[in-house]
Image (cartoon, helix red, strand yellow):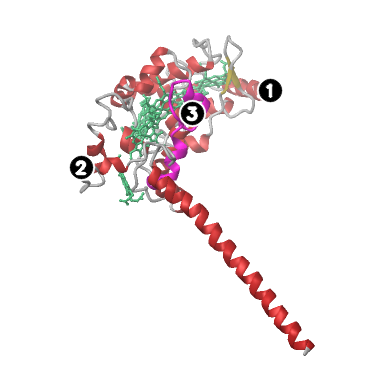
Amino acid sequence: MYWQILLAVLWMLASPPAGLAQTNEACLACHQVEGTKARFPDGGEIDVRVDPKKFAASVHAPLTCITCHTDLADYPHRPIKAKTARSYHVLAQQICAACHADQAKAFEASIHGQGLRKGLADVPTCTSCHTAHAVVRPKAAAFRNNTPETCGNCHSDRAVMGRYGLRPVYQAYVEEFHGVTTRLYRLATPLSPSPSAVCYDCHTAHAVRRHSDPESPVAPANVLATCRTCHKTAGRFFATAWNEHQAPSMRHSPLVYLVQVFYMILIPGVVGLLALLTVLDLRFWAVIRRRGRKS
Ligand code: HEC
Ligand code: HEC
Ligand code: HEC
Ligand code: HEC
Ligand code: HEC
Ligand code: HEC
Ligand code: HEC
């Protein structure tokens, strides 16, 4: 790693100083080298490699590295301000916010943004959902169809969610009608956007609120209107069809649960009975043949 960096530095020094470090190639000469890490005072570190192919395919491909990293044109770089890897990611969000003020404002007011200000370790920053250097258009089907997994990175983790008194809802989502359809789209037709509800259709992407917050689109007073954005003709009681992110049980959706149990008994029962009948039938014919031979 070190000799490769040394070579890159020599190459930079040998070239005309003005403007050289301004090109993406100059940055990438070091930032593709395996094992290059930024280290923090607490012993934490982050990998500082950037994949040029992914960057070239991203929405930001026309930008230069230093459009975003305005204070890093020189090497050695100025010292890193952040004390931990986590605070590095949190601070770096301001880079995105500088150009996407609307999203940043909505996000700041959200339950996730509030968590960041409180210093919570498990809430997302812009790059948790978008990445830093492989940002794609969120309207692209592949991005949409994958968002349950994006949110599910955290919302499927029982231990992490437990710290905030929340249930890991991802598991129940992938088993309900909307989740099953979206998963099929993701696996079978990743280039068509799922018409079914993904997390942000009900919760929004940036302005996520607690479900108990009266302004949340899933609060009791608003949830029917949220369903009606797609189920245009939904009647007054339609939202009660919602499974509340709970796998069916005797406590939640007992009817659905009982039907599931019924089929769980019925299907193996029927198959078992058929197998038994076949065995009995074969034995019956074996006995008949033996008797025929004897007489
Ligand atoms: C000579 C090699 C070299 C060059 C050229 C280089 N970097 Fe770095 N960069 C590093 C190393 C090594 C680190 C790890 C932290 C450190 O040692 O400063 C780093 C860290 C970083 C970081 C993360 C730390 C921070 O302060 O945010 C960013 C972002 C970064 N570089 C951007 C750039 C950009 C943009 C360019 C081009 C203008 C560039 N680098 C050119 C070697 C280089
Ligand atoms: C659209 C803005 C933008 C552009 C363009 C951009 N970066 Fe970054 N970069 C960021 C942000 C934001 C972060 C902080 C990400 C995080 O939270 O880890 C970052 C982080 C980094 C890091 C630290 C490691 C990491 O992934 O967190 C390095 C190194 C880096 N960038 C290098 C580059 C290089 C080299 C280029 C040009 C090829 C480039 N960046 C182009 C926004 C950008
Ligand atoms: C220097 C300004 C700048 C910075 C900083 C920046 N972006 Fe962008 N971003 C743009 C531009 C320009 C576009 C392309 C706009 C277009 O063509 O719709 C864009 C497009 C996007 C899109 C696609 C928008 C759409 O409607 O399809 C997303 C998502 C996005 N950026 C996220 C981010 C994230 C996340 C960060 C931080 C890592 C970031 N941006 C940092 C300028 C910036
Ligand atoms: C929890 C995940 C998540 C976080 C955190 C997040 N985004 Fe997004 N972002 C999304 C999703 C999902 C969409 C698609 C929304 C849609 O199509 O309605 C999106 C869409 C966008 C778009 C496209 C325009 C739009 O509003 O639909 C931009 C630009 C963007 N995000 C920037 C940002 C920036 C900047 C941050 C940080 C301040 C950020 N995002 C934080 C998930 C996230
Ligand atoms: C990096 C991890 C992470 C990601 C990714 C993430 N979340 Fe969260 N989310 C959290 C944490 C942690 C909390 C709890 C914050 C608190 O209680 O202060 C939370 C809280 C919430 C809440 C509030 C729950 C309630 O009713 O109290 C909702 C709703 C939510 N997230 C939806 C989403 C959606 C939708 C996405 C994807 C677009 C997403 N989250 C992505 C970590 C994450
Ligand atoms: C983004 C659009 C969208 C939103 C928002 C949405 N749904 Fe759906 N929903 C669909 C689509 C498309 C289907 C049919 C395909 C499938 O089963 O996923 C469906 C299927 C259903 C079904 C299965 C029976 C049927 O009609 O096919 C129920 C029940 C349902 N949704 C309830 C709800 C409830 C309750 C809400 C609000 C909390 C809601 N949906 C919000 C798009 C949506
Ligand atoms: C069809 C609409 C709909 C979709 C899709 C949806 N949610 Fe929800 N979500 C709700 C409603 C309504 C509530 C509030 C009542 C409840 O707990 O069911 C809720 C509650 C929550 C809660 C609070 C759970 C708790 O423990 O109190 C979280 C977190 C959450 N959703 C995250 C997500 C994530 C992550 C996804 C995608 C994997 C998602 N939601 C998809 C409608 C939806």
Q: What's the CA distance linking mark 3 and mark 1? A: 21 Å
Q: Is the Cβ of the residue at disc 2 closer than 8 Å to that at disc 1?
A: no
Q: Which residue is mark 1?
A: 3
Secondary structure predominantly adopted by residues drawn in magenta: helix
* Residue placed most toward the observer, 219 or 183: 219
Left or right of 21: which side holds 213?
A: left
Q: Is mark 3 within 8 Å of ligand 2?
A: yes
* Residue placed most toward the observer, 11 or 6: 6
Q: Which residue is mark 3?
A: 24
Tell me if residue 73 can be seen: no
Q: Residue at x 62, y 71 (%)?
A: 278
Q: Quadrant of the C terminus?
A: bottom right
Q: Residues within 10 Å of mark 2 (few under 14, many from 20)?
A: few
Q: Is residue 181 above or below residue 18?
A: below
Q: Is the Cβ of the residue at disc 3 closer than 8 Å to that at disc 1?
A: no
Q: What's the CA distance linking mark 3 and mark 2? A: 57 Å
Magenta-span inclusion, residue 263: no
Q: Residue at x 68, y 22 (%)?
A: 3
Give amino acid for label 3.
Answer: Asn
Q: What range is drawn magenta here?
A: 154-179
Q: Quadrant of the N terminus?
A: top right
| Res 49 label | none
* Residue placed most toward the observer, 223 or 114: 223
Give amino acid for label 2.
Answer: Arg
- Residue 238 falls in which quadrant of the image? top left
Left or right of 109: which side holds 278?
A: right
- Residue 103 falls in which quadrant of the image? top left
Q: Which residue is mark 2?
A: 236
Which comes sooner in the sequence, label 3 or label 2? 3
Q: Position of residue 219 (x, y in %)?
A: 27, 30
